[in-house]
Amino acid sequence: MARATIKSIAARTGYSVGTVSSALRGVKSVRRETREKIQKVANELGYRVNLDGLKLRTNKSYHIAVLVGVSMDASEEWEGVEFTRILSGISIALQGSRYQLSVFSVSDIESAIVTLQSIVHEGLADGVIFSGTRRNDPRIAFLQKHGFPFVTYGMSDSPKPHPFVDFDSQAAAYDATTRLIDLGHRRIALINPPGDLIYAAQREKGYLDALAVGGVSFDSELICNGPTTALFGRQAFQALMQAPNRASAIICANEAMTLGVLSAAAETGVQVGRDVVVISTDDLHLSQYFVPPPSTYYLPIVETSRLLGEFMLKSLDGADPSETQKKIRATFIERQPDTPAPQMARAN
């Protein structure tokens, strides 16, 4: 089989040799759709560009950095986030492009800033993706200051718009709370992430808005903020059940917290579905195997992470942030009948 050349690609695609050459070099004056079409044919024909030479000509690394949070505490528990699936979705989006993923492990905000400084100043990547956005997030401020392309998994309170993909946490919390109020619940607890996370604030707002609309008084003792782990879910459940006027329904921020709640309920003889109703958000379909399997708000993680990769490529092409922002509504999956406990349902 003859070696693929720019001329053979031009003949197959119908574009000029100059257009093909520019597209394969990533020249931005060539439309993204045209570049993708030419790259697809180049891949089919087995064309291989001299990437080292291309890096020298374009002063690009052709790497996308993904920051992955890793706890330095060996006893840290599962938090319900499956990074392999997130990386898989991003990788799918990068197929057909020249970009490769580079994973950087960070333990906290401070180490993330140090890592970002290396990425930006040493040219280790051309763009970066990270999650867990916080209020006044210094990572976002740093990248915006240096004009470095990035996409966040989660919205932010930055006054300057930027690309993001996010699960609509506020809508899920509002819908779950409203559902429980309509079933007669008045003591509804929210087991939530730490308050400095943007999505924790979004969940709390949805929860509070639903209480206000439903005419249910707010009790701050019913909101538990802490690590998104099974251990904290367990501890929060124990505290809620020891209260004089305990909760009849609980909304958990993720599957890990939900697992802790179900474990504590089983140990204390509280029957989920009869004595207390449990609803989970950020479902990755793992909770269908819990006992009992709770009702959840399902998040299509592969689709979400694929959008992260697509938005990264668009950002590298100079797309306006308005074209690279997406909030995804979760799908409610009813696995348990939401029946309130008679003795608790209308406690006030």
Image (cartoon, grey):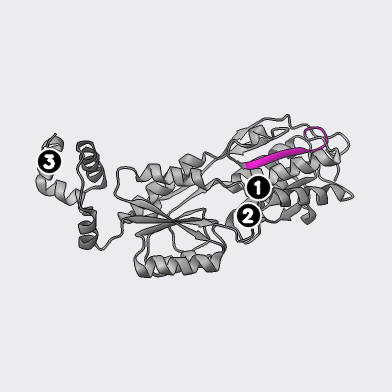
Whether residue 214 appears in this view of the structure is no
Front in this rendered view, residue 64 or 204:
64
Q: Amino acid at mark 3?
A: Ala
* Image depth: mark 3 or mark 2 in front: 3
- Say the numbered circle drawn on residue 200: 2
CB under 8 Å between discs 1 and 2: yes
Q: Is residue 64 left or right of residue 9?
A: right
CB under 8 Å between discs 1 and 3: no
- Say the numbered circle drawn on residue 253: 1
Q: Earlier in the sequence, mark 3 or mark 2?
A: 3
In space, the residues marked 1 and 3 are separated at their CA atoms by 52 Å
Secondary-structure class at tag 1 = loop
215 falls in the magenta region? no
Range of the magenta residues? Answer: 273-281
Q: In which quarter of the view is residue 65 placed?
A: bottom left
Q: Is residue 240 above or below residue 55?
A: above
Q: Position of residue 269 (x, y in %)?
A: 85, 38
Which residue does the image show at 61% across and 43% down from the upper left? 172
- Say the numbered circle drawn on residue 10: 3
- Say the numbered circle drawn on residue 76: none
Q: Amino acid at mark 2?
A: Ala
Q: Is residue 230 above or below residue 56?
A: above
Mark 3 crowd level (few <14, some 14–19, many ≥20, 10 Å Cα): some
278 falls in the magenta region? yes
The N terminus, quarter of image: top left
Q: Position of residue 266 (x, y in %)?
A: 80, 38
Front in this rendered view, residue 305 or 247:
305
